[in-house]
Image: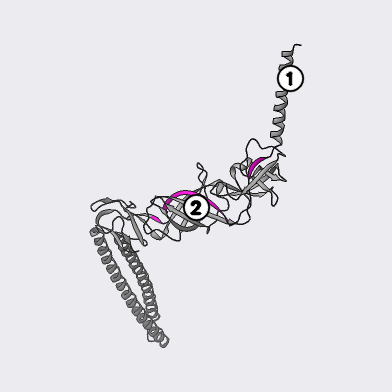
Amino acid sequence: MNASLKTRLGLAVLVAVVVAAGVVLARSRPIDVIAVQRVDAVPFEVFGLGTVEARVLSRVGFAVPGTLERVNADHGDRIEAGTPLAVLDSAAQAARVTKAQALLTQAEASRGRARAQVGRAEALLAQRAQTRKRQDALVGKGSVSVEASDDARTTEQVAAAELEVARQELLLAAAAVDDARAQLEIERVQLAQHTLLAPYDSLVVERLREPGAVLNPGEAMFTLIDPASVWALAYVDEARAGGLVPGLPARVHLRSLPQQTFTGEIARIGIESDRVSEERRVYIQCTRCPERFYLGEQVEVIITKRVANDVLLIPEIAVLGVSGADGWVWTVEGGRLHKRAVKVGDRTLDGRVEVLSGVEEGTLVVAEPTPALREDKRVRSRTRSAP
Protein backbone atom coordinates (compact mmCIF):
# COMPACT_ATOMS: atom_id res chain seq x y z
CA MET A 1 0.00 0.00 0.00
CA ASN A 2 1.57 3.31 -0.99
CA ALA A 3 1.77 6.40 1.23
CA SER A 4 -0.93 8.32 -0.68
CA LEU A 5 -3.51 5.59 -0.18
CA LYS A 6 -2.70 5.35 3.52
CA THR A 7 -3.13 9.09 3.85
CA ARG A 8 -6.58 9.07 2.20
CA LEU A 9 -7.76 6.18 4.38
CA GLY A 10 -6.58 7.96 7.47
CA LEU A 11 -8.41 11.11 6.51
CA ALA A 12 -11.58 9.15 5.83
CA VAL A 13 -11.39 7.45 9.19
CA LEU A 14 -10.77 10.79 10.87
CA VAL A 15 -13.79 12.36 9.17
CA ALA A 16 -15.99 9.41 10.16
CA VAL A 17 -14.85 9.69 13.77
CA VAL A 18 -15.51 13.43 13.80
CA VAL A 19 -19.00 12.99 12.28
CA ALA A 20 -19.87 10.21 14.72
CA ALA A 21 -18.65 12.30 17.61
CA GLY A 22 -20.76 15.22 16.33
CA VAL A 23 -23.84 13.05 16.06
CA VAL A 24 -23.34 11.66 19.55
CA LEU A 25 -22.75 15.14 20.88
CA ALA A 26 -25.84 16.51 19.09
CA ARG A 27 -28.04 13.73 20.40
CA SER A 28 -26.80 14.12 23.93
CA ARG A 29 -27.05 17.88 23.97
CA PRO A 30 -30.33 19.13 25.49
CA ILE A 31 -32.74 20.93 23.17
CA ASP A 32 -34.91 23.90 24.03
CA VAL A 33 -38.70 23.42 24.28
CA ILE A 34 -41.61 25.62 25.29
CA ALA A 35 -43.95 24.13 27.88
CA VAL A 36 -47.25 25.31 29.33
CA GLN A 37 -48.39 25.53 32.92
CA ARG A 38 -51.79 25.58 34.61
CA VAL A 39 -53.83 28.79 34.47
CA ASP A 40 -56.86 30.30 36.19
CA ALA A 41 -60.01 32.11 35.03
CA VAL A 42 -60.18 30.30 31.72
CA PRO A 43 -63.39 31.00 29.74
CA PHE A 44 -64.52 28.06 27.67
CA GLU A 45 -66.54 29.61 24.87
CA VAL A 46 -68.34 28.46 21.75
CA PHE A 47 -68.67 30.42 18.53
CA GLY A 48 -71.73 30.42 16.34
CA LEU A 49 -72.72 32.22 13.16
CA GLY A 50 -76.35 32.98 12.48
CA THR A 51 -79.05 35.53 11.80
CA VAL A 52 -81.56 37.78 13.52
CA GLU A 53 -84.98 36.10 13.62
CA ALA A 54 -88.37 36.47 15.33
CA ARG A 55 -89.89 33.69 17.38
CA VAL A 56 -93.42 35.02 16.75
CA LEU A 57 -93.92 35.73 13.04
CA SER A 58 -97.33 35.63 11.38
CA ARG A 59 -98.56 36.03 7.83
CA VAL A 60 -102.11 37.23 8.41
CA GLY A 61 -105.04 37.56 6.03
CA PHE A 62 -108.82 37.55 5.90
CA ALA A 63 -110.80 34.40 6.68
CA VAL A 64 -113.42 35.35 4.07
CA PRO A 65 -113.14 36.34 0.41
CA GLY A 66 -113.74 39.89 -0.74
CA THR A 67 -112.48 43.07 -2.34
CA LEU A 68 -109.95 45.04 -0.33
CA GLU A 69 -111.51 48.40 0.47
CA ARG A 70 -109.08 50.06 2.87
CA VAL A 71 -105.58 49.44 4.26
CA ASN A 72 -104.65 51.08 7.57
CA ALA A 73 -101.08 49.83 8.16
CA ASP A 74 -97.84 49.80 6.24
CA HIS A 75 -94.26 48.53 6.41
CA GLY A 76 -92.54 49.51 9.66
CA ASP A 77 -95.67 50.45 11.60
CA ARG A 78 -95.99 49.35 15.21
CA ILE A 79 -99.54 48.22 15.88
CA GLU A 80 -101.33 47.50 19.15
CA ALA A 81 -103.32 44.29 19.51
CA GLY A 82 -106.87 44.67 18.16
CA THR A 83 -106.05 47.56 15.81
CA PRO A 84 -107.83 47.31 12.41
CA LEU A 85 -105.20 46.59 9.77
CA ALA A 86 -107.42 46.44 6.67
CA VAL A 87 -111.10 46.29 5.66
CA LEU A 88 -112.97 44.40 2.94
CA ASP A 89 -116.07 45.67 1.13
CA SER A 90 -118.85 44.48 3.46
CA ALA A 91 -122.07 45.83 1.89
CA ALA A 92 -123.33 42.40 0.85
CA GLN A 93 -122.49 40.86 4.20
CA ALA A 94 -124.17 43.72 6.06
CA ALA A 95 -127.34 42.99 4.07
CA ARG A 96 -127.13 39.33 5.11
CA VAL A 97 -126.92 40.45 8.73
CA THR A 98 -130.05 42.57 8.28
CA LYS A 99 -131.89 39.65 6.71
CA ALA A 100 -130.83 37.33 9.53
CA GLN A 101 -132.04 39.92 12.04
CA ALA A 102 -135.43 40.01 10.33
CA LEU A 103 -135.66 36.22 10.37
CA LEU A 104 -134.88 36.25 14.06
CA THR A 105 -137.65 38.78 14.69
CA GLN A 106 -140.06 36.61 12.69
CA ALA A 107 -139.06 33.51 14.65
CA GLU A 108 -139.53 35.32 17.94
CA ALA A 109 -143.01 36.43 16.83
CA SER A 110 -143.89 32.83 15.94
CA ARG A 111 -142.67 31.73 19.32
CA GLY A 112 -144.88 34.34 20.96
CA ARG A 113 -147.91 33.13 19.02
CA ALA A 114 -147.10 29.52 20.00
CA ARG A 115 -146.83 30.59 23.61
CA ALA A 116 -150.24 32.23 23.37
CA GLN A 117 -151.68 29.06 21.84
CA VAL A 118 -150.37 27.11 24.81
CA GLY A 119 -152.08 29.53 27.17
CA ARG A 120 -155.37 29.26 25.25
CA ALA A 121 -155.14 25.44 25.26
CA GLU A 122 -154.44 25.41 29.01
CA ALA A 123 -157.47 27.64 29.67
CA LEU A 124 -159.68 25.47 27.43
CA LEU A 125 -158.50 22.32 29.19
CA ALA A 126 -159.27 23.85 32.56
CA GLN A 127 -162.76 24.77 31.37
CA ARG A 128 -163.43 21.29 29.96
CA ALA A 129 -162.16 19.67 33.15
CA GLN A 130 -164.52 21.81 35.23
CA THR A 131 -167.43 20.86 32.94
CA ARG A 132 -166.60 17.18 33.25
CA LYS A 133 -166.59 17.45 37.05
CA ARG A 134 -170.02 19.08 37.07
CA GLN A 135 -171.35 16.40 34.73
CA ASP A 136 -170.02 13.68 36.99
CA ALA A 137 -171.71 15.28 39.97
CA LEU A 138 -175.02 15.58 38.16
CA VAL A 139 -174.87 11.95 36.98
CA GLY A 140 -174.73 10.94 40.64
CA LYS A 141 -177.89 12.93 41.33
CA GLY A 142 -179.60 11.56 38.24
CA SER A 143 -179.94 15.03 36.69
CA VAL A 144 -178.03 14.16 33.47
CA SER A 145 -177.47 11.01 31.55
CA VAL A 146 -174.31 8.91 31.62
CA GLU A 147 -173.84 9.65 27.92
CA ALA A 148 -173.62 13.38 28.66
CA SER A 149 -170.96 12.70 31.30
CA ASP A 150 -168.99 10.55 28.85
CA ASP A 151 -169.15 13.32 26.25
CA ALA A 152 -167.76 15.81 28.78
CA ARG A 153 -164.89 13.44 29.60
CA THR A 154 -164.09 12.97 25.92
CA THR A 155 -164.12 16.72 25.35
CA GLU A 156 -161.67 17.12 28.26
CA GLN A 157 -159.32 14.55 26.74
CA VAL A 158 -159.42 16.33 23.37
CA ALA A 159 -158.55 19.60 25.11
CA ALA A 160 -155.58 17.88 26.85
CA ALA A 161 -154.33 16.56 23.50
CA GLU A 162 -154.68 20.01 21.95
CA LEU A 163 -152.65 21.43 24.84
CA GLU A 164 -149.88 18.91 24.20
CA VAL A 165 -149.85 19.85 20.50
CA ALA A 166 -149.62 23.52 21.43
CA ARG A 167 -146.71 22.82 23.76
CA GLN A 168 -144.85 20.93 21.02
CA GLU A 169 -145.51 23.80 18.64
CA LEU A 170 -143.98 26.12 21.25
CA LEU A 171 -140.87 23.92 21.43
CA LEU A 172 -140.55 24.04 17.64
CA ALA A 173 -140.95 27.81 17.70
CA ALA A 174 -138.29 28.13 20.41
CA ALA A 175 -135.94 25.95 18.37
CA ALA A 176 -136.59 28.16 15.35
CA VAL A 177 -135.65 31.20 17.43
CA ASP A 178 -132.40 29.55 18.53
CA ASP A 179 -131.61 28.65 14.92
CA ALA A 180 -132.33 32.18 13.71
CA ARG A 181 -130.23 33.66 16.51
CA ALA A 182 -127.33 31.32 15.66
CA GLN A 183 -127.61 32.23 11.97
CA LEU A 184 -127.56 35.92 12.90
CA GLU A 185 -124.45 35.34 14.99
CA ILE A 186 -122.79 33.56 12.06
CA GLU A 187 -123.57 36.46 9.75
CA ARG A 188 -122.28 38.95 12.34
CA VAL A 189 -119.06 36.95 12.75
CA GLN A 190 -118.56 36.91 9.00
CA LEU A 191 -119.21 40.65 8.91
CA ALA A 192 -116.60 41.15 11.63
CA GLN A 193 -114.17 39.03 9.58
CA HIS A 194 -114.31 41.71 6.89
CA THR A 195 -112.08 43.74 9.22
CA LEU A 196 -108.58 42.35 9.79
CA LEU A 197 -107.39 42.99 13.36
CA ALA A 198 -103.85 42.81 14.72
CA PRO A 199 -103.62 39.56 16.73
CA TYR A 200 -100.97 40.97 19.10
CA ASP A 201 -98.74 44.00 19.58
CA SER A 202 -97.00 43.85 16.23
CA LEU A 203 -94.44 45.32 13.91
CA VAL A 204 -95.45 45.28 10.25
CA VAL A 205 -92.64 43.64 8.32
CA GLU A 206 -94.36 43.46 4.95
CA ARG A 207 -97.58 44.71 3.30
CA LEU A 208 -98.53 42.41 0.44
CA ARG A 209 -101.74 43.75 -1.18
CA GLU A 210 -103.27 47.10 -2.10
CA PRO A 211 -106.86 48.47 -2.10
CA GLY A 212 -109.00 47.08 -4.91
CA ALA A 213 -107.38 43.65 -4.86
CA VAL A 214 -109.70 40.65 -4.72
CA LEU A 215 -108.56 38.33 -1.94
CA ASN A 216 -109.15 34.65 -1.34
CA PRO A 217 -109.70 33.23 2.15
CA GLY A 218 -106.39 32.81 3.97
CA GLU A 219 -104.38 34.82 1.44
CA ALA A 220 -101.57 36.66 3.22
CA MET A 221 -102.13 40.40 3.58
CA PHE A 222 -99.39 41.35 6.06
CA THR A 223 -96.30 39.81 7.62
CA LEU A 224 -96.20 40.66 11.32
CA ILE A 225 -93.77 39.95 14.12
CA ASP A 226 -93.86 40.43 17.85
CA PRO A 227 -90.93 42.84 18.50
CA ALA A 228 -90.47 41.37 21.97
CA SER A 229 -89.78 37.95 20.45
CA VAL A 230 -86.76 38.93 18.34
CA TRP A 231 -83.72 36.74 19.01
CA ALA A 232 -80.55 35.49 17.37
CA LEU A 233 -80.45 32.07 15.75
CA ALA A 234 -76.87 30.76 15.84
CA TYR A 235 -75.55 27.59 14.23
CA VAL A 236 -72.97 25.88 16.45
CA ASP A 237 -70.71 23.02 15.39
CA GLU A 238 -71.94 19.80 17.00
CA ALA A 239 -68.38 18.99 18.05
CA ARG A 240 -68.38 22.15 20.21
CA ALA A 241 -72.02 22.10 21.32
CA GLY A 242 -71.66 19.64 24.22
CA GLY A 243 -72.63 21.20 27.53
CA LEU A 244 -74.80 23.95 26.06
CA VAL A 245 -77.97 24.45 28.08
CA PRO A 246 -80.62 27.19 28.26
CA GLY A 247 -79.60 30.10 30.46
CA LEU A 248 -75.90 30.22 29.54
CA PRO A 249 -74.68 33.78 28.85
CA ALA A 250 -73.79 34.92 25.37
CA ARG A 251 -72.37 37.90 23.51
CA VAL A 252 -73.86 38.94 20.19
CA HIS A 253 -72.22 41.05 17.48
CA LEU A 254 -74.33 42.41 14.64
CA ARG A 255 -72.70 42.65 11.25
CA SER A 256 -73.91 46.24 10.92
CA LEU A 257 -72.57 47.18 14.38
CA PRO A 258 -69.36 45.14 14.79
CA GLN A 259 -67.95 47.57 17.33
CA GLN A 260 -70.84 47.01 19.74
CA THR A 261 -71.52 43.99 21.94
CA PHE A 262 -75.03 42.98 22.92
CA THR A 263 -75.60 40.53 25.73
CA GLY A 264 -78.07 37.69 25.97
CA GLU A 265 -78.57 34.11 27.06
CA ILE A 266 -79.59 30.82 25.52
CA ALA A 267 -83.38 30.66 25.35
CA ARG A 268 -83.75 27.44 23.36
CA ILE A 269 -81.65 24.72 21.78
CA GLY A 270 -83.11 23.05 18.72
CA ILE A 271 -83.92 19.38 19.18
CA GLU A 272 -83.06 18.63 15.55
CA SER A 273 -79.61 19.44 14.17
CA ASP A 274 -78.84 20.28 10.57
CA ARG A 275 -78.01 16.95 8.95
CA VAL A 276 -75.91 18.51 6.20
CA SER A 277 -73.79 21.06 8.03
CA GLU A 278 -73.78 19.03 11.30
CA GLU A 279 -74.64 22.11 13.30
CA ARG A 280 -76.96 22.68 16.21
CA ARG A 281 -79.51 25.49 16.25
CA VAL A 282 -79.10 27.69 19.34
CA TYR A 283 -81.49 30.59 19.99
CA ILE A 284 -80.19 33.59 21.96
CA GLN A 285 -82.63 35.94 23.72
CA CYS A 286 -81.00 39.33 24.25
CA THR A 287 -80.81 40.95 27.68
CA ARG A 288 -79.35 44.14 26.23
CA CYS A 289 -80.90 44.63 22.82
CA PRO A 290 -80.21 47.00 19.92
CA GLU A 291 -82.67 49.85 19.37
CA ARG A 292 -83.33 48.69 15.80
CA PHE A 293 -83.10 45.24 14.32
CA TYR A 294 -83.27 43.75 10.86
CA LEU A 295 -84.53 40.24 10.32
CA GLY A 296 -82.01 38.06 8.55
CA GLU A 297 -79.01 40.20 9.47
CA GLN A 298 -75.90 38.12 10.10
CA VAL A 299 -74.74 37.84 13.71
CA GLU A 300 -71.74 36.37 15.46
CA VAL A 301 -72.49 34.72 18.80
CA ILE A 302 -70.03 33.75 21.52
CA ILE A 303 -71.49 31.56 24.28
CA THR A 304 -69.65 31.10 27.57
CA LYS A 305 -70.03 27.48 28.65
CA ARG A 306 -68.04 27.88 31.88
CA VAL A 307 -65.11 29.67 33.50
CA ALA A 308 -62.59 27.31 35.16
CA ASN A 309 -59.55 27.67 37.42
CA ASP A 310 -56.39 25.56 37.71
CA VAL A 311 -56.72 24.28 34.17
CA LEU A 312 -53.98 22.74 32.04
CA LEU A 313 -54.42 24.20 28.57
CA ILE A 314 -52.26 23.31 25.64
CA PRO A 315 -52.41 24.27 21.96
CA GLU A 316 -54.48 21.87 19.90
CA ILE A 317 -51.42 21.20 17.74
CA ALA A 318 -49.64 19.84 20.81
CA VAL A 319 -52.09 16.93 21.07
CA LEU A 320 -50.92 14.23 18.66
CA GLY A 321 -52.81 11.24 17.33
CA VAL A 322 -56.19 12.63 18.43
CA SER A 323 -59.11 10.21 18.20
CA GLY A 324 -62.24 11.62 19.78
CA ALA A 325 -61.20 12.70 23.26
CA ASP A 326 -57.95 10.65 23.31
CA GLY A 327 -54.45 11.58 22.14
CA TRP A 328 -50.91 11.87 23.41
CA VAL A 329 -48.52 14.67 24.31
CA TRP A 330 -44.86 15.23 25.08
CA THR A 331 -44.15 15.98 28.74
CA VAL A 332 -41.05 17.23 30.49
CA GLU A 333 -40.21 15.10 33.52
CA GLY A 334 -36.86 15.38 35.26
CA GLY A 335 -35.44 17.31 32.31
CA ARG A 336 -36.30 14.55 29.82
CA LEU A 337 -39.06 14.01 27.33
CA HIS A 338 -41.76 11.40 27.75
CA LYS A 339 -44.81 10.52 25.67
CA ARG A 340 -48.05 10.39 27.69
CA ALA A 341 -51.57 9.36 26.68
CA VAL A 342 -54.13 11.98 27.67
CA LYS A 343 -57.82 12.71 27.54
CA VAL A 344 -58.87 16.16 26.39
CA GLY A 345 -62.02 18.16 27.05
CA ASP A 346 -63.34 21.55 26.07
CA ARG A 347 -61.58 23.89 23.71
CA THR A 348 -61.11 27.65 23.86
CA LEU A 349 -61.66 30.06 21.00
CA ASP A 350 -57.92 30.81 20.80
CA GLY A 351 -57.04 27.24 19.82
CA ARG A 352 -56.24 25.64 23.16
CA VAL A 353 -57.62 22.41 24.58
CA GLU A 354 -58.16 21.31 28.17
CA VAL A 355 -56.19 18.27 29.37
CA LEU A 356 -58.47 16.26 31.66
CA SER A 357 -56.24 13.35 32.62
CA GLY A 358 -52.95 11.64 31.83
CA VAL A 359 -50.62 14.35 33.11
CA GLU A 360 -49.67 14.50 36.79
CA GLU A 361 -49.86 17.70 38.82
CA GLY A 362 -46.84 19.93 38.20
CA THR A 363 -45.76 18.15 35.01
CA LEU A 364 -44.97 20.43 32.08
CA VAL A 365 -46.40 19.76 28.62
CA VAL A 366 -44.57 20.70 25.44
CA ALA A 367 -46.53 23.39 23.61
CA GLU A 368 -44.80 23.19 20.22
CA PRO A 369 -43.78 19.61 19.32
CA THR A 370 -41.22 19.17 16.54
CA PRO A 371 -39.83 16.15 14.66
CA ALA A 372 -36.64 16.44 16.76
CA LEU A 373 -38.41 15.31 19.93
CA ARG A 374 -37.53 11.81 21.08
CA GLU A 375 -38.42 9.66 24.07
CA ASP A 376 -36.05 10.29 27.02
CA LYS A 377 -34.43 13.19 25.17
CA ARG A 378 -32.79 15.78 27.42
CA VAL A 379 -34.43 19.20 27.18
CA ARG A 380 -34.27 22.68 28.57
CA SER A 381 -37.77 24.07 29.05
CA ARG A 382 -39.28 27.46 29.58
CA THR A 383 -42.92 27.88 30.47
CA ARG A 384 -45.74 30.08 29.36
CA SER A 385 -49.47 30.16 30.19
CA ALA A 386 -50.75 30.88 26.68
CA PRO A 387 -49.83 29.76 23.21
Q: Residue at x 69, y 30 (%)?
A: 22
Quadrant where the image shows the N terminus:
top right
Question: How far across and down, in percent of the image, does residue 99 sit?
Answer: 25, 63
129 up-or-down from 55: above or below:
below
Upstream in sequence: badge 1 or badge 2 = 1
Q: Main secondary structure of the magenta part?
A: strand
The spot of residue 223 in percent (x, y) is 34, 54
Q: Which mark is residue 337?
A: none
Give the secondary structure at mark 2: strand
Nearer the observer, 149 or 89? 89
Instruction: Give me the residue at 61% from left, 54% from top.
Output: 39
Q: Which residue is mark 1?
A: 10
The location of residue 336, given as percent across then percent down, is: 71, 42
Q: Residue furthest front?
A: 3
Q: Residue at x 38, y 85 (%)?
A: 134
* Range shown magenta: 29-57
Front position in the image: 166 or 356: 356
Q: Nearer the viewer, residue 106 or 30?
A: 30
In the displayed structure, 12 sits above or below 194; it is above
Marking on residue 302:
2
